[in-house]
Structures are given as structure tokens and as C-alpha cells.
Amino acid sequence: MADLLGSEEPRIFTPPLRELTPETSYGFSVIDVAENVLGISRFPWEEWFFVHAREANPDGSFRFRRIVLLVARQNGKSTMAQVLALWALFVLGVGLVLGTAQSLDTSEETWAGAVQMAEECPELAEGVERIVRVNGKKAMEIAGGGAYKVAAASRRGGRGKTGDLVIMDELREHLNWEAWGAITKTTNARPNALIVCMSNAGDAYSVVLRHLRYAAHMALGDPDGWCASVGDADGDEGAPPDDTLGLFEWSAPPGCSKWDRAGWAAANPSMGHGTITERVIASDAATDKESVFRTEDLCQWVETIREEPFPEGSWEAGTDAASSIADGEPVALGLDVSADRAHAAVAVAGRRADGRLHVEVAAYRSGTTWPLTWIAERTERYKAEFGGMRIAWQKRGAPVSSMADELNAIEGLDACEVEGRDLAAWCGRLWDGVAACLDGSGSDSTPVMHRPQPVLDMAAKTAATKPLGDSAWVFDRSKSPEDCSPLIACAMALGLLQKPDEDKAIQSVYSAGRGLMVI
């Protein structure tokens, strides 16, 4: 049987604007330097990438100012970065190539490889003027003023420099925007600069990669349906496409089995070319945690490779698109505000006709003033028709507590301000109910069901937790990569619903067709 060969063409990519030839793509020049100067034979996929990623505009400028290369681990990204850096220095004659990765050691290793290539190539070695090998200040200076330097991926990385080519490895590890803001802005004074971002797939913590991938996928019509499911947490979803952003993604298709050999080839283009083998990938598939395997070997986006707040598979097991609170059943509401006060969420909880419990996000919007109006409008109606509205929020130590005085001033509102001990108990109660959705869980708790809702599903898959005493814990707003206020609001609603004072519970808002779903 012939060895499985990796795919030369990425599964998802920004298509060229015209036929790519030596006159319309700088990539052919990069390949020439690799083969005829450095003596490096590139794999088919690498040549494909250079040709497509280095497309030129009719006036000779670079088509792309930002390039995102996504490919599974150990497929040769570092060597490609080294070749690109040397080509930019010795062929284009740029002033500064700046290399960075989340680990300074990684960027210095890539730099050291490029230095070795230059030193071992007589044609390039004579153009090397000075090499600085001091840790943290490594630089290769070229006759005529060009240089290849490294910088830390931090808020100070690259500041004070003006870069022509920025190579950012391990973009998935950028958990905030500080390094991106500091390093990429070194190119703003260069009209023909290039930022090359390389990575395998990320998760919800990978905020920079997520935003760039979202923008590129949206420009391509959301080919995987991923944009519709996750939204863009860091950008304007109505913004026009960025025609300077290019995406080249070698990844397995969503939903494929981890044993799908075609998926292995789609994410590992170097497979069968003397490096990655099927045997290696099969070993990873058999031994790795599935989320790790999909991220590292299949280059598939997962919500998180970290420990999820609920038992694996339990949140999915409780998903029911038709779930709702039965008519005549009491309901309770929960309110919470995100750590950055950018969003607020109102959730509802009640009992279904089959006896199971139900939670859902009733409203989730930007800002923190709208809940006052939202609640006041419904409180008056519920007082007249149902006798009142029960709602819970955290009393202090949370962003929502700043609204307490205004909430308590709403006439007819039956408010419950929750202390830390109750909050921990209510978070645990939600956990128990979600865990009970798994077959064979052995739990005595009533299963808690929910509808598919992206804002709630994302929070339920990524929320971090923090201890509160010896055995108690709560969801952690500040440490969660996504806004977990929808999940905390659900915990509030569920806890209030199950408080002993059942006599204060109100009639279901689902009766008479009054749904709360107004996201």
C-alpha cells in the first residue's frame, strides 16, 4: 500500500485574484532562493503556499499585508519562516525582519536556524556583517543595514522598532491583544510590510487567532459554519472584509472522525514526504485526549483543550432544541454582568412537562443599563397577570452588584441578593443537574436541560472556576476566556427556583405564548 500523502492544497484559503506566475507572485522568487541558493528542496504544499501567499498586486505591491498560516504541528513552519526571512533580507533588501513567538526560546531557535543557513551558504555568508548572539538581543546584521532580530511576545516587544517583515509563530498562544498591538504596529510606517502569523488551531483562549480566523472565514462565506456558531468576540461583526488578510488553512473538516485518514492528510501536508507518517498520527489518535489530538494533529478549532467546567459530554447530552418550561410551572430569573461590564445576561429556569428542569438565556445584550428597563417592563406585566417576578443576582463582589440599588427600587420586584455561600451552592446545583444528563451518571439530581444557544453553549464549554473555601467553588468571570455571565445567570435562576420559599414563585412566562427568548 502506498504511503498516504498530505494535501498540497489547503482545505480553506483566500483565492488568488488572477493567475499566479513569476510575474504575479513573489513566491516563485522565494522558491528559487530556497532551492538554488540555500539548497533546500521544499515539499509541494510549501511551494504552493509561497506562490499563493506572496501574490502581487498589479502595481507590484504585496496583495496581503497579514497572512495566517494554519497547519498541524511539526509540518515545517519554522523552516518556511527561515527561508522567508532570508529571502526578504537578501533579495528584497528590507530593513528589519522581526521574529517573535510566545516563547522567546522558540523565536530564537528559528532565528538561529536562519543564521546557520546564511553562514553555510557562501553566496549569503559574504553579505553577513555581524551576528549578535547575546540572549535576548540576538541579531543578524546584513551589509547595507538590514537585520533579522527577535522580540518577546509581550506588550513591550518590538516597541521602538520599524519592521518590514514580522513573523509571529504560535499565534494560538496569544491570550490577549498586548503583544499583537506592540509588535504588529512596527509595520505601520512601511507601506509594503508583511505580517506572517503561523500556528496550529486554537481554542477560545486564543483571542487574536480567533479574531483573524473569524474575519478570514467570514470573507470566504463562513465555509465551515464556524463563524455563525462562535461569533466574533473582539470585533465588529458588520465590518467590511479586510482585503489585505490572507488565510491558508490546512485542517481536517469539522465533524470528521479522528480516525479519518483523509482528515489526517488535510491537516498534515508534509505527511508521506519523509517526515510525518501515518503511524505517528495513529499513535497520537490512540493516546491523546481527543480535544488535544484535534487541535494539534488535525488543526481543528475546539472550544477549549483545558478542563471543561462540566463532565465531558454532559452539556451536549442536555441539549434539546424543543426544551421549554411547562405551562403553569413557576419560574425564576437570574441576572449577571460580565467581568468587563461589556455585557449583561438574564436567564430563566423552570420545570418541563417531563419533570426535568430547564434553563435558558432570556436576554443577552451589550451594556449594563438595559436590564433595568427590561426587568421593569416585565415586572409590571407579571404583577398584574402572575403576581410578581422573582429574580436573583450576586449581592457583592461582582459587577452586577453596582446595579443593586436601582434594581431594588423597581416596584413589585421580588429580589433575591445572593451571598457567596449560596452562589457556590447554586453553581454546584447547576453542575449536578448538567452531570445528571449523562446516561449512567448515577446522579440523584434532576437533569437540567437547555436549548442550543451560542452564548450559553460557549460559556458552558469554557468557563473557568475558582475555589471558595475548602470544597465549594464558583464560576470565575475574570479567568474565563469567554463571557460566563450567561452561565452564572442560569445558576442564579436555577438556585432561586429551588429555594424553599416556593410560595413566592410565579406562573410560567410560557403560558399564553409569552416566550422570553429575545437575544
Image (tube, rainbow, N blue to C red):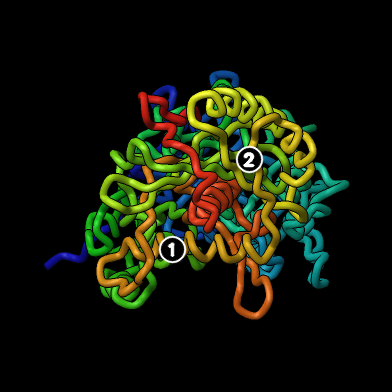
Residue depth check, mark 1 versus mark 2: number of the one nearer the observer = 2
Give x and y (percent) for residue 155. 80, 52
Q: Tag 1: residue type?
A: Glu
- Residue at 46% x, 46% y: name it: 349
| Relative vertical location of residue 274 with respect to residue 270 in this rendering, above or below | below
> CA separation, marks 1 and 2?
50 Å
Give 74 or 153, whichever is nearer the viewer. Answer: 153
Q: Residues within 10 Å of mark 2 (few under 14, many from 20)?
A: some
**Mark 2, secondary structure of its residue:** strand
Give x and y (percent) for residue 208. 61, 46
Quadrant including the N terminus: bottom left
Give x and y (percent) for residue 183. 75, 47
Give 313 or 328, whichever is nearer the viewer. Answer: 328
Residue topped by disc 2: 414
**Mark 1, secondary structure of its residue:** helix
Q: Tag 2: residue type?
A: Asp
- Residue at 36% x, 37% y: name it: 328
Say whether residue 83 is visible.
no
Is 430 positioned to the left or the right of 92 in the image? left
- Residue at 48% x, 45% y: name it: 456
Residue furthest out toward the left? 1
Is 342 positioned to the left or the right of 249 in the image? right
Residue furthest out toward the right? 160
| Relative vertical location of residue 101 with respect to residue 408 in this rendering, above or below | below
Say whether residue 467 is visible.
yes
Q: Residues within 10 Å of mark 1 (few under 14, many from 20)?
A: many
Count of marks, rendered view: 2
Q: Which mark is residue 296?
A: 1
Give 57 or 13, whichever is nearer the viewer. Answer: 13
Give 323 or 195, whichever is nearer the viewer. Answer: 323
The quadrant holding residue 277 is bottom left
